[in-house]
Amino acid sequence: MKILITGGTGYIGSHTILMLLNEGYDVIVIDNFSNSSPKVIERIEFLSQKKVCFHEGDIRDERFLKSVFKEHVITTVIHFASLKSVSESISMPIEYYDNNISGTLTLLKVMNYFGVNNFIFSSSATVYGAPSRIPLDESCDTGDTTNPYGTSKYFLEQILIDTQRANPALNIMLLRYFNPVGAHSSGFIGEDPNGIPNNLFPYITQVAIGRLPRLSIFGDDYPTEDGTGVRDYIHVMDLASGHVAALNRQHVLTGLRCYNLGTGKGYSVKEIVETFQKITGKKIPYIVSARRPGDIAECWSSPELAQKELHWEAKRSLEDMVIDAWNWQNKNPNGYLE
Ligand code: NAD
Ligand code: WQD
């Protein structure tokens, strides 16, 4: 039983691979390094004390994919490969739709050609758009997305629903991640964004390490307790264990399934800054600036369905997220660049 992981050297993929290797799974990894470093492989090998079976290539390249599927008997695909920057997607919609949608279509065609029927897809809470109610459960409306990245995930969910309907032998899980943060507790692998981070956690850790002068808090006039945005942050190792749970349960949870992977708790930007300062002893200077276009006031998950059906729940606290995010940044001030 071999598991193909696309986008496996990225942030979430790398943590998931490590956990799968440690649990004894046979893993094949592909990535084109468009948003990750080859060093990730060395570090996973060091941590797991196992060799990573890696193929460099692009999921839009059908010949490349066929060569991988021909070499290995693959039973399940966990599909992380995607471009993921909201701001970049607004200026480069064609590249985003091409990479995310064409890439997934090519992958699905090749899976079909080789008769591979199990698929686990990285979706996102972003498909809910502006929440119709909170906490968000899987029956909430989707599709009111505000940027091409989010729309690509929404379209892909629809494509996967149609594909599964046409071929009931397919088992597809849509995993809607909330806000993944933190790193492996070793500090050997973590999130390494290109350029100035878009997301709150890497921005804060880069301020703390001295790479950025201050944080801008995007708005303190939201209808939330302290006026700043509220999100459901989830430790990346909890997210990784969500994938292991999905893999273990897919033979029972057949057909098309959709699960939120979140903690069910929301924290505001100010709460994150305060917790970070308290735990690390580092001052995070900040200014309050205008709201970021497309941002919503608050969002957190109902993780109940995943608890019930995947037998999974997030275990790590906000303190764990902060400790591990800071440990990674502190040990790797420039990410994977030496
Ligand atoms: P990431 O950018 O760190 O990892 C994605 C990996 O895919 C990268 O290593 C990149 O090089 C690779 N890749 C991209 N296009 C490729 C292609 N055409 N062929 C081969 N490899 C390709 O992102 P991540 O944070 O690890 O996210 C993983 C998945 O989870 C993505 O699908 C993302 O959209 C989704 N997701 C992420 C978040 C988040 O906040 N990090 C939240 C919700 C959903
Ligand atoms: C969190 C909070 C910001 C940065 C994004 C994507 C989403 C998903 C996860 C993939 C918000 C505030 C942020 C900063 C700030 N990705 N903030 N200053 O926007 O919830 O979700 O990543 O699917 O699609 O949209 O996460 O970390 O960017 O923001 O004040 O410099 O922090 O306004 O309230 P977001 P985030």
Image (tube, grey):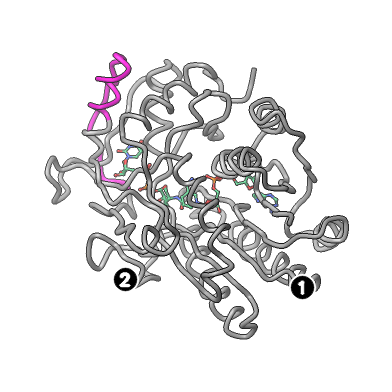
Corner quadrant of residue 1: bottom right
> How dense is the environment of label 1, judged by Cα within 10 Å: few (below 14), some, or many (20 and up)?
few
Disc marking residue 115: 1
Image location (x, y in percent) of residue 17: 63, 42
Q: Residue furthest bottom?
A: 166
- Work out whether residue 161 or residue 216 is closer to the camera in this orientation and state it: 161
Looking at the rendered image, the quarter that the C terminus falls into is top right
Q: Does the residue labelled 2 lie within 8 Å of ligand 2?
A: no
Residue at 31% across / 34% down in the picture? Answer: 318
- Say left or right for 205 vs 278: right
Instruction: Residue at 61% x, 42% y: name it.
Output: 23
The quadrant where residue 32 appears: top right
Kind of residue indicated by mark 2: Cys
Task: From the image, state whether disc 1 or disc 2 is nearer to you.
Answer: 1
Q: Pinpoint residue 313: horizontal percent, then vertical percent.
A: 38, 50
301 on left or right of 198: left
Tell me which segment is drawn in magenta.
273-292
**In-front residue for pair 290/105:** 105
The vertical placement of 332 against 105, above or below, is: above
**Pick the front one: 128 or 220:** 128
Above or below, comparing residue 265 to residue 186 in the picture: below
Q: How far apart are marks 1 and 2 (CA)?
A: 33 Å
Residue 76 seen by the camera: yes
Q: Where on the picture, by quarter, is residue 281?
A: top left
Residue 66 horizontal/vertical position (percent): 84, 62
Residue 30 visible here: no
Q: Residues within 10 Å of mark 2 (few under 14, many from 20)?
A: few
Residue drawn 48% across and 55% down? 90
Q: What residue type is labelled 1?
A: Gly
Tell me the number on the disc at residue 140.
2
Disc 1, SS: loop
